[in-house]
Image: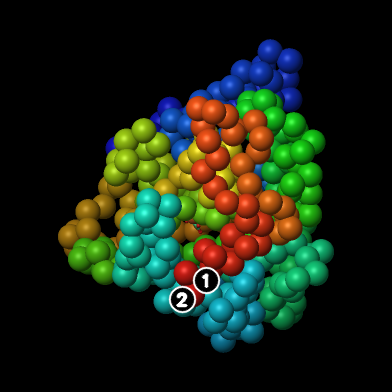
Amino acid sequence: MTDKGVNLDMSLFFGTPEEKTYFCTELLRLLKLRGGVKIQNHSIPDEDIHKLFEMSRKFFSLPLETKMEAKRPLQANPNRGYAFVGQENVAKISGYEKGAGPGTARDIKETLDLGSAQDDLAENRWVPEDSLPGFRGFMEYFYEKAFKTEMQLLSALAIALNVSEDHLKALHNRAENEFRLLHYPAIPASELADGSATRIAEHTDFGTITMLFQDSVGGLQVEDQTQPGVFRSVESAKSTDIILNIGDSLQRLTNDTFRAACHRVTYPPAIKAGDNTEIPERYSIAYFVKPNRQASLFPLKEFITDATPCRYDDVTAWEWNNRRIGQLFG
Ligand SMILES: O=C(O)CCC(=O)C(=O)O
Ligand SMILES: [Fe+2]
C-alpha cells in the first residue's frame, strides 16, 4: 500500500497567521494518523540536499580500508563513525515499543553516524581530508542547517499541541542530535527472500522526531498508527522531501498523544522477494532530533490529566538513549 496523501507544504508555516495555523493543525493530524508526513518547501535549500546525497555517495564509494579510518567503536555511545555491513542489526530492538521480543534478521546496510561539532561528549570520526576533500566542512554546515529546520518544526509541533514553544525548543537547544548517512548496497532479491536478512529491520527511533531524506529507489515502510501491522510504502517524489516521523522521546513527552512510528526498509514495492533480479542500491540520510541529554522525558504537564494519567517514569534523554542503545549492542 503506497501512501500518496501525506504531503505538507511548509511554506504555509511561514505564511499568513491562518496558513500557519493550518500547517500546524495538519501536521498534528497527519502524524497522529500515519506516524509520518512528507514536508515540502521547508527551509533547507534543495541544492544543499543534492550536495548531501552526492557527498554521501562519494563517502560510501571510498575503499573499505579508507572508510574504516572513521570506524565506529563496537559499542559506540553515542553513535559516532562508520559501521560496516553486518556491524549493526536493528532487529535486536524490533518490537520494543510493542512489548514484543527482538528479531534476528541481519541488516544489509552501511552507515556513518555524526554528531554536533560542538558536542563535548563524543568526537566525530572522519576519513582523512585528502581522501574526500570538503566532506567534513559540508557535513558540519548541513548539521547546522538541519538544526534550524528542526527548531521550526518543533515550534509547529508546540503550537499544534498547545504547549510552550520556548519550553519545547529549550529542551532541544544543545543540538545533541545524531545525523546518519545510510547506504544499502545492491543485492540479489533472493537474499531477502527468507526473512533472515533485510535492509533495516522494523524499529522506532529513540529521539523526538526524525527528519529523513531518501533517494527514489523506495522500500521504506511506516506502520499505520490506527491499524497495527499495516505497513505503508513511503516514497519521495523528490529527494528534497523531508519525511518526518515521531520517535520514542516525543511519545513519552506527550504521554502517548503521539506514538513513535514503527518503520523499516525492505525491497522496493515493484520487486518481489522471490524475483530473480537485483535490488538496486539505495541511499538515505536521517537527522535524529533528540532532547538535550540532561532533559527529562517525563510527560509534559499538559498531557497528564484525570482521563490520561501519567504513563512514564522520569528518565533523562541520556538514560533513555543508553537503555535503547544497550539493547542494540546487548
Ligand atoms: O533508510 C531509511 O529510509 C530509514 C533509516 C532508518 O530508519 C534509521 O536509520 O533509523
Ligand atoms: Fe529509523
Q: Classify 10 Å Cα crowding around label 2: few (below 14), some (14-19), many (20 and above).
A: few
Across and down, in percent, residue 249 comes to 58, 49
In front of the other: 255 or 129: 255
171 to the left or right of 91? right
Cβ atoms at labels 2 and 1 below 8 Å apart? yes
Residue at 59% over, 34% down: 304
Kind of residue indicated by mark 1: Gly
Q: Classify 10 Å Cα crowding around label 1: few (below 14), some (14-19), many (20 and above).
A: some
Q: Specify the amino acid type for callout 2.
A: Gly
**Quarter of the rendering containing residue 57:** bottom right
Q: Which mark is residue 326?
A: 1
Name the foreground residue: 293 vs 113.
Answer: 293
Please name the colour scheme applied to the rendered image.
Answer: rainbow
Residue extending furthest toward the bottom: 65
**Residue 236 makes an appearance in the image:** no
Q: Which mark is residue 272?
A: none
| On-image quarter of the N terminus | top left
State the separation of the CA atoms marked 2 and 1.
6 Å
Q: Mark 2 sits on what residue?
A: 330
Residue 17 percent coordinates (x, y): 73, 15
Tell me the element at label 1: helix
